[in-house]
Image (cartoon, helix red, strand yellow):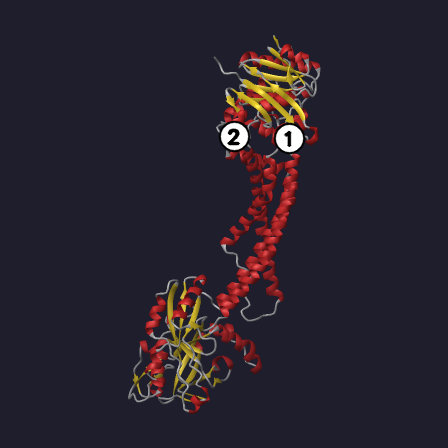
Amino acid sequence: MSVPAIRTRGLSRVHDGGRDARRALADVEIVVEEGEFVCVLGPSGSGKSTLLAVIGGLDRGYQGEIELFGEDIGRMSDAALARLRGERIGFVFQHFHLLHHLTVIENVTTPALFDPHGDEEACLARAKHLLDRLGLADRAGDTPAELSGGQRQRVAIARALLRKPKLLLCDEPTGNLDADTGARIIELFEEFHREERLTIVAVTHEERLARAATRILRLHDGRVDASNEVSA
Amino acid sequence: MKLAALVRLVRRDLARARRALAGSAFGIAAGTATLVFFLALGLGVRAVLLGEVFPIDRIELEPPKAKDPGLLGLLLGGGGEPSGIRPDDVDALGRVPGVKRVLPKLSLAFPASARGGREILGHDVGASELPGDGIDPSLAAADVKPGLFVDPMDTPGPACTDDAACTGGAYCERAEGVAEGRCSAPVPAIVSRYLVEIFDKSIAPAHGFPAVGETLLGRAQGITFTVRLGESLLGRAKQGSPRTIKARIVGISGSATDLGLTFPLGVVRRWNREFGGERAAERYSSAVVEARSGAEVADVIDAGARMGLSPKDTRARDVSVLVSGVMALLSLVAGVVLVVSASSITQTFRALVLERRGEIALYRAVGATAGEIGAWTVSLAAVVGFFAGALGLVVARILAFIADWAAAEKLPDFPFKPDTFFAFPWWLWLLGMGFSILFSVLGAIGPARAAAKVDPARALAGS
């Protein structure tokens, strides 16, 4: 029996705001098998982004348990968790988070800066291959300011995939894009999921991205609504 | 993170935030320049004071002074003689840890007077009382041409009964009661720079004589004196018959006695035996102890004290303490400048970290550890400190050049006026650079910790 990519048990997260403490996640129990494309749907404020940050090890203020590929990340040191993020997880954000003082190729190779075993030439070749596959080969020397929104998100996807992660965590990846560009990005996710057996967890409030997923989870007030779990 | 990656990150930062970093580096550069300038000034001044005026790596130890006999003692003809330093004590001093060598001195134990100087001054001048010392010739080896400062009787001339029998400026060296003497070249003598300075600045102007400083150095072999042994204005020696010998000044040396003439040790021992007796010939009046370093002089003084010997001159120690105190004060001022500069680094880096929270969060998301984020920030500060330090060192050196030039041009001539008031040993460059980097890094530690603690989830959500 294979180890799931993600398993949470009694996962809760309370954002401490003094008197205004707010429960973002409450007793979330989910299992995502390797190779799944899971879409977490929910309205704004339902805890989707918090779920992604917690699962990705960016937010450690949770209660409960999170296992990634069989390892309890709550027991990991900061350095071990950072290594896990670098080696096995790729992030795609709604706002792209590209570094505007760098060129496209420099942005894509940013994760390699923190790879203690990385080969610079191999990394550069991988970055060029990804840019070529994402249709940006001729924009490698440009800065993000010279790109459209869709191109920026493709650069962010290339960056997320540079170190060949097993898990891609996407936070509203089409939220800042027009319909056509968003559709093209969704196609890319489908391609990578299908061709590279990439496990994808995307949180969104857009139904069109959900239609591409193999499973849909609905989040409401920090709770997963099991009755509405849908398999594609 | 590999070093190459860290270098790449820092290089990118230097390029994109050069204006902000240059602003904070300016303070560190100013602090480093101040520190190095003051330290170099202190070291330079101390080198002149302790190297030429009051040498500190050598100390002269002397036995206790003769006891005050009191009125009754004087009436009874007492008065006690100085105990002197026995040859055994000299050997014991040589075995003290930290001692490089011991060079005993023998003062003239009889009255003497001198007259001469016509070659330079136009007519003879005299000293009615001539103090003098005998030293091991090796003490003056660095200051006098080889072979000049030696006992002439090491290579005696032909036999003689009076000066007329000797030629070429030689005289007949013949003690009382000896039937036949030997012709001898004039006895070599050295004088102190201090004596020359006193003559040039005080005596020469009062009598209308030319200054002899440089001239004396150039014509050292030409200045001959006659010295009357065993007799002076104040009286005669207890034994022996006064006689006249020839002496020649062969150089200026820091080893010479401050006031008077300094002769080779063997010559003075012979004269003391003739005019003062065997004890005056064998008991040394003092011993110059050369320590391996100035820091070991204190141990030498302690060892000497256990043998009943005390430093003849404590000015060197006093000057050393004074200069060290002034240097410490000036360094403190420079330290304050550096601390203030470090706070400027703190402000700049705090602003940079605040401005780059999103970037830091992204790095954390793609695999950077908190330690790597901190190391990146501190490394950037260290590089800023390096460049600021280099600038500070250059500025300090330029300021030293300007100060030396101004001193040479504007300050009147004074005794021991040096060509440079500054010393820049190799370790001072390293120290300046080290302090610059250290204070930059210290200033960046707070912001580096803040950078390492950036909450990636919150920072990424807030962008």
Q: Residue at x 51, y 72 (%)?
A: B214
Neighbor class of circle 1 (other Cα within 10 Å; few <14, some 14-19, many 20+) is many
> Is B355 in front, or is A69?
A69
Neighbor class of circle 2 (other Cα within 10 Å; few <14, some 14-19, many 20+) is few
User: Residue B358, which numbered label?
Assistant: 1
Mark 2 belongs to chain? A
* Residue that mark 2 sits on: A77
Instruction: Give the left or right position of residue B13, taking residue A79 as reference.
Output: right
Q: Position of residue B169 (x, y in %)?
A: 38, 82
Q: Position of residue B268 (x, y in %)?
A: 37, 79
Query: Where is B132 relative to A229, above or below?
Result: below
Q: Position of residue B36 (x, y in %)?
A: 56, 55
Amino acid identity at mark 2: Ser
The residue most toward the top is A232
Q: Position of residue B372 (x, y in %)?
A: 54, 34
Amino acid identity at mark 1: Gly
Q: Alpha-carbon distance for marks 1 and 2?
A: 22 Å
Query: Where is B202 relative to A130, above or below?
Result: below
- Please identify the quarter of the rendering in which residue B86 is found: bottom left
